[in-house]
Structures are given as structure tokens and as C-alpha cells.
């Protein structure tokens, strides 16, 4: 076999239909779009419309509730906190507050507060003051010899 003998399987490729190219093409003049109306024009997509049938998004049941005033916390994992301490971006001699975490670049913005989670390993003895923390995170910090205080109405969960 040579390069010039390479062929695709018969019927593997199909030429695309060129619409509006004369009556001989079978899709001439109006290109299969019919006469007038919204769907004969260009740039029309009637999304979610099912021809008078009840649309799918209306047939499905609605459940649940989105609380409009819920709090959104910036999440910090202990493993990443330890990585920043090892890289000398966070000073462990003083108390680590939320402002210190933002300045170090660990979190971009505080949102409604910073919440500490127990993912990862913490080896440094730190004094941490944040808005929220999981029970496992509090235990992990105390196991390393440090302290984690929650400064807000939101108690550790």
C-alpha cells in the first residue's frame, strides 16, 4: 500500500447539503425553510419551545428553597495553611487573624468570614482567630499544640 492509495471506507464521508443553490439541488430557493414566518428567517432559535406541548422545564417538579440571605464563607484547609507557614508567607509568632490570611494571599477576600476545615496535616503550633471552624479542625490545631478561637456568633459545627 502506498500513500496515494489510502482511501476512507465507502460511505464514511457524506458531502454537506448546500441549500439555496437552484431547483436542481432539491433544496433550492427557500432551502427547505418553507414560506415566511419566524423560522424562515436567519438568527432564530426558539429554545425551550416544544410546539405548544408543555415544556420540559415546566413538567418537572420544583423542590427546595434557596435562602436569599445565607452566609458565604471563604474556606481554608489546614494543609494549605501549613504550606503557607512553611513558605514563610505567614508568621506563626503572632496571632493569625483573617486579615493576615488575606494579606498572605491564602484567601482572596473574606466574604462573610473565613471558615477553617480539617483537610490536610498541621504540624506548626499556631494561634488562629477566624469566623468559623469545623470540630475536626479545632481538634487538629489543639493536637499540634495551638489554639483556634471562633470570633463570631457562628459556633464551631
Image (cartoon, rainbow, N blue to C red):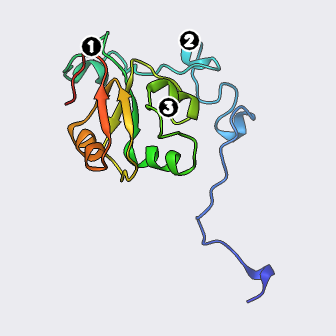
Task: Farthest residue to the front: give it.
Answer: 93
User: Does residue 93 sit above or below 11 in this rendering?
Assistant: above
Q: Which residue is mark 3?
A: 101
Q: Position of residue 138 (x, y in %)?
A: 25, 39
User: Does residue 140 sit above or below 4 in this rendering?
Assistant: above
Q: Quadrant of residue 155?
A: top left
Q: Evaluate if marks 3 and 1 touch, with contact meaning CB atoms under 8 Å apart.
A: no
Q: Which residue is mark 1?
A: 67
Q: Position of residue 62 (x, y in %)?
A: 21, 19
Q: Residues within 10 Å of mark 2 (few under 14, many from 20)?
A: few
Q: Quadrant of residue 113?
A: top left
Of residues 147 and 74, which is closer to you in this image? Answer: 147
Task: Farthest residue to the bottom: give it.
Answer: 1
Of the residues tagged 3 and 1, which is closer to the observer? 3
Position of the N terminus, as image quadrant, is bottom right
CA distance for labels 2 and 1: 43 Å
Of the residues tagged 2 and 1, which is closer to the observer? 1
CA distance for labels 3 and 1: 28 Å
CA distance for labels 2 and 3: 60 Å
| In-image side of 127 versus 58 (left or right) | right
Q: Position of residue 64 (x, y in %)?
A: 19, 20
Q: Evaluate if marks 2 and 1 touch, with contact meaning CB atoms under 8 Å apart.
A: no
Q: Which residue is mark 2?
A: 37
Amino acid at each position: 500500500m502506498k500513500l496515494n492509495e489510502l482511501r476512507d471506507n465507502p460511505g464514511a464521508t457524506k458531502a454537506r447539503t448546500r441549500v439555496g443553490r437552484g431547483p436542481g439541488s432539491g433544496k433550492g430557493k427557500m432551502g427547505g425553510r418553507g414560506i415566511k414566518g419566524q423560522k424562515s428567517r436567519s438568527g432564530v432559535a426558539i429554545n425551550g419551545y416544544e410546539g405548544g406541548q408543555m415544556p420540559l422545564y415546566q413538567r418537572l417538579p420544583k423542590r427546595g428553597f434557596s435562602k436569599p440571605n445565607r452566609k458565604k464563607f471563604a474556606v481554608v484547609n489546614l494543609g494549605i495553611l501549613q504550606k503557607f507557614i512553611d513558605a514563610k508567607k505567614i508568621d506563626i509568632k503572632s496571632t493569625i487573624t483573617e486579615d493576615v490570611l488575606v494579606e498572605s494571599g491564602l484567601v482572596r477576600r473574606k466574604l462573610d468570614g473565613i471558615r477553617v476545615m480539617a483537610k490536610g496535616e498541621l504540624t506548626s503550633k499556631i494561634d488562629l482567630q477566624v469566623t468559623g471552624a469545623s470540630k475536626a479542625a479545632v481538634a487538629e490545631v489543639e493536637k499540634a499544640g495551638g489554639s483556634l478561637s471562633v470570633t463570631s456568633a457562628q459556633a464551631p459545627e
